[in-house]
Amino acid sequence: MGITFQVAGRSTCDRARVGAIIVKDRRILTTGYNGAPAGLAHCDDIGHLIVGGHCVRTLHAEQNAIIQAALHGVSVAGGAIYVTHQPCLTCAKMIINAGIRRVIYAGHYPDQNAVAFLQAARVELVAHPAPGKLEPADEAPMNNV
């Protein structure tokens, strides 16, 4: 998860610095962070494009990680995605269709539809504490992936 937060630091939209890494067989396949499409101006440079309370100038970190895999011919089917924030519904649908089987996230995002879709598709959704945060004493330690 620490690497995922390092990737988030590359984000070019300061409304939410989000990072994602896709892992399979304990190897990092791709990374992604939220930012504008390739060759287009970033929020950090020209400002946000807000529609319905969300910045739509950027692609989400999960989207960029999945797109990078497709661009370079890397199969992510059967893999896991680590994300600094719980995926939104659009990202959840992309995760499902990419064949990713596990989502590990640190920060909550209030999208119950995304949770419902992931559960219906039998994609494991795992909350993981952000680096440096202690787990509550009444919870068992998380297994390393």
Image (cartoon, rainbow, N blue to C red):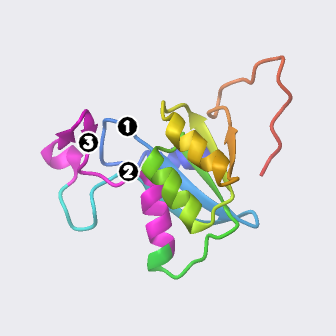
Helix, strand or loop at label 3? It is strand
**In the image, residue 127 lies at what x, y percent?**
67, 36
Under mark 3, the amino acid is Cys
Mark 3: few/some/many CA within 10 Å (<14, 14-19, 20+): some
10 to 130, vertically: above or below? below
* Residue that numbered label 3 is attached to: 55
- From mark 2 to mark 3, how far is it between C-alphas? 10 Å
Say which of 103 and 11 sits in front.
Answer: 103
- From mark 2 to mark 1, how far is it between C-alphas? 8 Å
Under mark 1, the amino acid is Ala
* Residue that numbered label 1 is attached to: 16
Residue 71 falls in which quadrant of the image? bottom left
Under mark 2, the amino acid is Asn
* Residue that numbered label 2 is attached to: 34
The answer to the question of whether label 2 and label 1 lie on touching residues, with beta carbons closer than 8 A, is yes
Helix, strand or loop at label 2? It is loop
